[in-house]
């Protein structure tokens, strides 16, 4: 078993789901949330510090999540489906690991044929209004992605692991995967590019890198 962990926002898709959810609440909420997201992705503030602050501003509804699910699909990274097909042919199973929200990512994962998502579950009231998020979700804090990968490795003992992502929270997995691939197709982040052992700007470049892993 070879496991290919993939970040979602600004990696598999050009958008940041939370920014799009914010935009659905108007330009003021959007500007505030985008600033918080960028600060976290650049490693300037801890993720857990901004997590509930952003959600309290946005209060995403189930309906808004479905809309953002469509946006993920519309803004899919060029070459993603070909890269996934090549990876599957080479024996890799893709898994999404995201600090975004499970509800909007689900339709996108389904579109990609990816069955496993580790993201942050949102809670809704019966009529679909925001009712909080899963405080225990590992990716709602720094160190969440390596924790998830460590647990999966302990449970399933994969022969190889790879991680692809654009953010500092993705880079945190580098010490525990066989290959970490920084992704700069949408939002190249200097902090990631400098330290990543491999860096791509297009999914067409992924297969060759995966082939270097035993
Ligand atoms: Mg990302």
Image: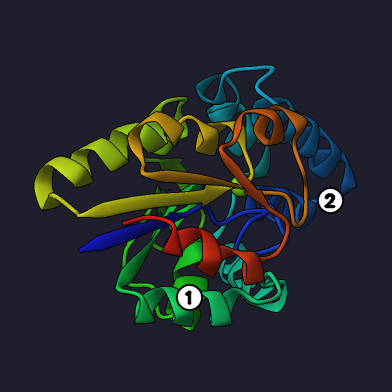
SS at mark 1 in the image: helix
139, above or below 122, in the image: above
In the shown orientation, is residue 156 left or right of residue 190?
left
55, above or below 2, in the image: above
Q: Nearer the viewer, residue 198 or 143?
A: 198
Residue 4 shows in this picture: yes
CB of residue at label 1: within 8 Å of ligand 1? no
Which residue position is annotated with label 1?
84
Q: Nearer the viewer, mark 2 or mark 1?
A: 1
Q: Nearer the viewer, residue 193 or 80?
A: 193
Give the residue displayed 46% in from the left and 79% down from the top: 86
Q: Give coordinates of residue 168: x percent, y percent.
A: 59, 31
Residue 62 shows in this picture: no
Which residue position is annotated with label 2?
26
> Which residue is situated farthest in the right direction here?
27
Q: Nearer the viewer, residue 59 or 186?
A: 186
The total of numbered circles placed on residues is: 2
Q: Nearer the viewer, residue 69 or 202?
A: 202
**Quarter in which the N terminus is drawn:** bottom left
2 or 1: tag closer to the N-terminus: 2
């Amino acid at each position: 078993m070879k496991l290919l962990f993939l970040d979602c926002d600004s990696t598999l898709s050009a958008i940041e789901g939370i920014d799009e959810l914010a935009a659905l609440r108007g330009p003021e909420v959007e500007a505030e949330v985008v600033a918080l997201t960028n600060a976290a992705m650049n490693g300037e503030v801890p993720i857990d510090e901004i997590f509930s602050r952003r959600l309290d501003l946005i209060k995403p509804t189930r309906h808004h999540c479905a809309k953002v699910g469509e946006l993920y699909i519309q803004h899919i990274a060029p070459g993603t489906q070909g890269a996934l097909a090549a990876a599957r042919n080479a024996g890799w199973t893709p898994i999404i690991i995201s600090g975004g929200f499970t509800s909007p990512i689900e339709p996108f994962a389904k579109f990609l044929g990816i069955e496993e998502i580790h993201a942050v579950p949102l809670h809704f009231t019966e009529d679909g209004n925001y009712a909080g998020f899963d405080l225990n979700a590992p990716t709602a804090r720094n160190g969440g992605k390596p924790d998830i990968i460590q647990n999966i490795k302990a449970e399933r003992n994969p022969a190889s692991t790879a991680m692809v992502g654009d953010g500092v929270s993705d880079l945190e997995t580098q010490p525990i995967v066989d290959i970490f691939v920084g992704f700069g197709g949408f939002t190249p982040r200097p902090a990631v590019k400098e330290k990543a052992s491999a860096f791509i700007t297009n999914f067409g470049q992924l297969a060759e890198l995966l082939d270097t892993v035993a």
